[in-house]
Image (cartoon, rainbow, N blue to C red):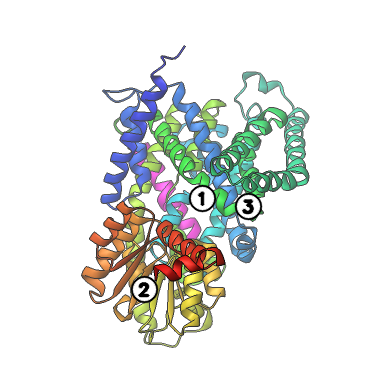
Amino acid sequence: MHHPTSLIAILSAGFVLAFVLGMAAQKLRLSPLVGYLVAGIIAGPFTPGFVADQTLAPQLAEIGVILLMFGVGLHFSLADLVAVKRYAIPGALGQILATTLIGTALAHVIGWPLAQGAVFGLALSVASTVVVLRALEDRRLLDTQRGRIAIGWLVVEDLAMVLVLVLLPALAGALGADPAAGSRDAWQILGALGGTLLKVGAFVAMMLVVGRRAIPWVLEKVAGTGQRELFTLAVLAIALGVAFGSAKLFDVSFALGAFFAGMLLNESELSHKAAADSLPLRDAFAVLFFVSVGMLFDPGILLAHPWRVLATFAVVTCGNALVALSLVRLMRLPRLTALTLAVSLAQIGEFSFILASLGVDLHLLDDEARDLILAAALMSIIANPFAFAWLDRQQARHEANEANIARDAAQAAEAVVDSQFQIPADTHGHAIVIGYGRVGQQLAALLHERKVPVVVIEDDADKVARARADGFPTVRGNVAAERVLEEARPQHACMAVFAIPRTLEAGVAIARLKAELNPGIGVLARAHSEAEVRHLLEHGADGTVLAERELAYSLAEMVMSTPPYRALRAAAG
C-alpha cells in the first residue's frame, strides 16, 4: 500500500522540478520538453537524492497520454490533411517505413532479434508534434505551403502510430513477446489480428454512430446550465470516460479512445471552449508524462554504450532528415520545403516514448533499447533548435537570391504567406487590435465602420481565419513574441488596443512596444481587476478598461434612462 504522501510528493516534486528545468531550457532556447525529461531523470531511481514512487508515476503518465491524445484529436483537421494529402500521406508513410528499416538494421548490428529491431525502428521514425509546432509557429511558417505540408505529414505520422499502438498488443505474441507464441501458426496469428481489428471496427462504428451525436449533445446541455466548472468536468469526463470505457469494452488502447473522443468533439461548435477549458489540466498531466518518461531513463547508458547512443542519435537526426529530404525532392517540391521537412523530422518525442513504454510492457523491447530511445530523444530535441537556426540562414540566403530574380507562382507560395494575408507595406496610421475574440471582433468592426485602418494580431488559427475572412490584415502568433509584434508595423501605427484577457503577455508586449518600437503610440488595454489595471499602467498602457466596471456603468446608465428613474436623473442633473 502506498504511503498517503506518495502522491503529493510525486506531484510536488514533478511540477517543481519540471517548472525550474523547463524555464532553464527555455532560457537556453531549447524546448521545455528537455527540462521536463531532465526533471524526471533527477527524480528517478538512477540518480541520487529524491526518488519518486515508481508505481504511481506510470499511472499519472497514463492520464497524461490520454489527455495528450484527446488534444491531438481535438485539433485534428481532416480538411487540412486533405489539402496536402498528395504529399503528406505517401511522404509520412514512406518515411516511417524507411527509418524503421534503418533502425531495424542498427538493431541487427547490435545483435537484437528482428521483432525488437522493428519496434525500435518504429520508435525512431516519428517526430514530436509539440516540438515541430513550436518551431514552425516561432518562424511564422504555419500559414505557408511548407508549413501546411509539415503539419499534414505529422498528422499522418500520429495516425499511423495510433494504429500501431492498437495492433501491437495483438501482434506481441506472434512477434515473440510470449514464449508460447512459437507454436502459433499463421492462421492463429491472423485470427488474433482479425479479432483485434473487429474490436477496433466495432468501437469506431459505435463512436461514429452514437458518439458523434451523444458527445456534442451532452456538451450543449451542460453549456446550457451556465456552470463553467460543470462544463470543464464534462470535457474531462468525456476524455477519460471514453478512453477507459473503450479499453474495458472493446479492448482497445486508452490512446485510441481518447483520440476519437477529441476528434468527435472537434465537430461540435463548443470544441474551442472544450479545448480552452481542458488545456491547463492537459498541459499539467502532459508535463507529468514527460517527467515519468525521464524517470525511466538510466544515464549510465551514455557511459556503458556511447557508440550505440551515437548511432541511435544518428538514425533519428541524419536518417530521418535524409529520408524526408529525398522523398520531398522526389515529389518535386521546392528546396526550402525539403529542408524544412528534413529539419522538422530530425527529432523524436511523445509518440516514441509511448511506443517504447508499450514495447517494454509487452516484452518486445528491453530496458537498454528504451534507454537508447530516450537518450536519442533528449539529444535530438536539444539539437533541433540549432538545426532550425541553420534553416533560418538558408531561408535568408534564399530570399536574398530570390529578390534579384523573378519568382514563379510555386516559389512565391513557398517563400511567404499568401499575399492576401500580408500586411501591406504602405500601412500607416492604423490601430493594432490584439486578440480577435468576442471583444476584439466587435472592436475591429466598430473601428472599421469609423474608417480607422485595422491590423489584427491573433494566435488562434480559427480566429485568424475569421479575421482574414472579415477583411482585416492579420498577423498570426503570440503578441509577446518579437517577430509577431514587429510584423504588425507598430512603428507606423497610431494606437494599439490589447483586447486579450492575458495580462502578463499584454504587459510584456506593451513594455517593448513603448520602449523599443514606437514610444509615441497610444496603448489601451483590457483588465479584469484593479491589480491588472495597475500592472498594465506600470508597463506603459495609457489607459485601461475594467470590464466589470464599464459594464456596471453602462447598466446604471440604462437604468437611469427608464421612466421610473428619469425624474431622479433630471433632479440630480
Secondary structure beneath dot 3 equals loop
Compared across the picture, whether 495 is left or right of 244 comes to left
Which label is found at residue 487? 2
Q: In the rendered image of this protein, does residue 210 appear above or below residue 114?
A: below
**Percent from the top left, x then y, of residue 300?**
31, 28
Secondary structure beneath dot 2 equals helix
**Percent from the top left, x then y, of residue 11?**
39, 29
Compared across the picture, whether 9 is left or right of 89 comes to left
Please report the residue visible at 62 percent of the width from the left and 19 percent of the height from the top: 179
Regarding residue 563, the answer to whether it shows in the image is yes
Magenta part of the chain:
305-325
Which of disc 1 and disc 2 is earlier in sequence? 1
Q: In the rendered image of this protein, does residue 73 appear above or below residue 287?
A: below
Q: Nearer the viewer, residue 256 or 75?
A: 75
Compared across the picture, whether 377 is left or right of 104 comes to left
Which label is found at residue 276? 1
Give the residue type at disc 1.
Answer: Ala
Give the residue type at disc 3.
Answer: Asn
- Whether residue 501 is in magenta: the answer is no
Q: In the rendered image of this protein, does residue 64 appear above or below residue 401?
A: above
Compared across the picture, whether 167 is left or right of 144 comes to right
Q: Nearer the viewer, mark 1 or mark 3?
A: 1
Which of disc 3 and disc 1 is earlier in sequence? 3
**Percent from the top left, x then y, of residue 167?**
66, 36
Q: Dot 1: within a 10 Å radius of its alpha carbon, few (fewer than 14), some, or many (20 or more) residues? A: few
Please identify the quarter of the rendering in which residue 379 is found. Answer: top left
Which label is found at residue 132? none
Which label is found at residue 266? 3
- Whether residue 311 is in magenta: the answer is yes
